[in-house]
Amino acid sequence: FEPARERAAAFAPGFPLSSAAQRETLTALATKLASAQASGDTKTAIELALILRGICAQAGFDDLEGPLGPDVSRYANAANEALARARTQLAEQIGEPLTVEQLRLMDGDERERFTHEHASFAWPGVALSPQSLYRVETVCGHATLLGAAEAVEEHHARLVKWYGSDPFTARPGLVRLVPEAFGLESEGAPFWWAGGFQGGDTTTLRFSCGTIEGLGRGLTHELTHRFDGALYPGLPAWMLEGRAVWTGAAYANPEDDEFVDDHALFGTIDDARIKGYGGREALEKLIKGTIEDYRDNYTAGYALFVFLKSWGDEDATPRYAKALLAYMKSRRTDKRDALDAFVAHFCDGKETRPADFEAFAAEFGTWATGFYWRDRKPWTKRYVESAGPSRA
């Protein structure tokens, strides 16, 4: 037993693998993957491709500890190409996705059997939303598949109303739900801490021990990225995340057909202040996209978006609202520096807007400070913290 204990200790978490060992492992996986594809073993090809892509996604995280590993780009490309090809083949093998009605009609035994039969992405559960706007794939079981397929179009419809148009009438979306963090990595997650991400028309989310109502918040957040990518391409990270945090919170229940326009997360705005974004230096970094932690876009970006969307003299049109729309529309074609473009739209001295960035930062800082819980300022009364009663 002693040799076994010694080997176990040698490979404990944190044991540094040599670059040669890492390359050999990646090469072996890639070779096995190519063999599975050549033999027409679609399921094994999918499983191996997901493993290989997950390792490559982990290697791409920019805050890893330890020595830098080998270049994994060619393995990532091989995994991506193999997975796309195998999933196309799998879709043909699966055939027509189930409908919501077919899922509802299953009895208890059938639901249990369905869950066990579709526990791997080599053979996931697949269904279409009622109007076929979304294909849902998951290994999270019957109840998750049914709930997500039923609810996704409600969140889509609310966003259509908010944006004023639907750019996806001929572009069905794909929602893929995974139960663990490694599932996100296998789908190519950009950050180790991500709970989900949007890539083109594919929405990937982690869903574990939650509710369909809670899942809807994540769906709304990621689908906001999908809409912004189609209607307002080129938005900076702070606005992308700020808008998505707002839409994910500014409604009560899935069937609500519109957002609560004056909704605000007081604690999130105060968090932005605590992190220093009420001051010019940090705010400038946020706008330039040079902040150290991407996650600050969720708090500070949210606060800045709510400010631009809503702030102004009481009972008057918010002073930045018109400029905000123009700014969003210009992101794809505006070649100016990020800060220069921001200043040109929001610090132009017109329609009661400040004449320079320093004055803008001071106004934003004063506004954000008003949400401090021990000293709320009068202007916070124009906002509501609750979007209304919601189901538990």
Image (spheres, grey):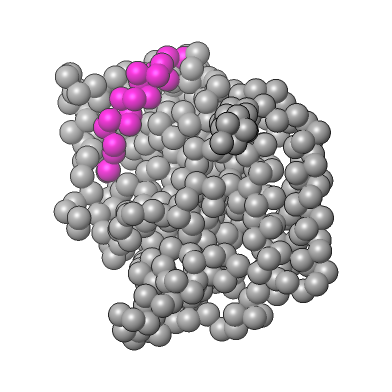
Q: Is residue 125 above or below residue 10?
A: below
The residue positioned farthest toward the front in the image shown: 1
| Residue 284 painted magenta | no
Residue drawn at (37%, 43%), measured in percent from left and top? 246
Q: Nearer the viewer, residue 35 or 111?
A: 35
Q: Quadrant of the N terminus?
A: top right
Q: Position of residue 192 (x, y in %)?
A: 54, 38
Total labels: the figure holds 0
Q: Position of residue 224 (x, y in %)?
A: 47, 52
Q: Is residue 189 above or below residue 286?
A: below
Residue 314 at least partly seen? yes
Q: Quadrant of the C terminus?
A: bottom left
Q: Nearer the viewer, residue 193 or 372?
A: 193
Find residue 46 and report its image quarter.
bottom right
Residue drawn at (20%, 23%), measured in percent from left and top? 373
Q: Position of residue 225 (x, y in %)?
A: 52, 50
Task: Answer with left or right where residue 232 lies relative to residue 279.
Answer: right
Residue drawn at (25%, 25%), measured in percent from left and top? 371
Q: Is residue 92 above or below residue 299?
A: below
Residue drawn at (77%, 74%), measured in percent from left and top? 40
Q: For the magenta stretch, what is the residue range? A: 262-280
Q: Nearer the viewer, residue 1 or 83?
A: 1
Q: Is residue 306 above or below residue 107?
A: above
| Residue 266 painted magenta | yes
Q: Nearer the viewer, residue 110 or 388?
A: 110
Residue 224 at least partly seen? no
Q: Position of residue 152 (x, y in %)?
A: 41, 65
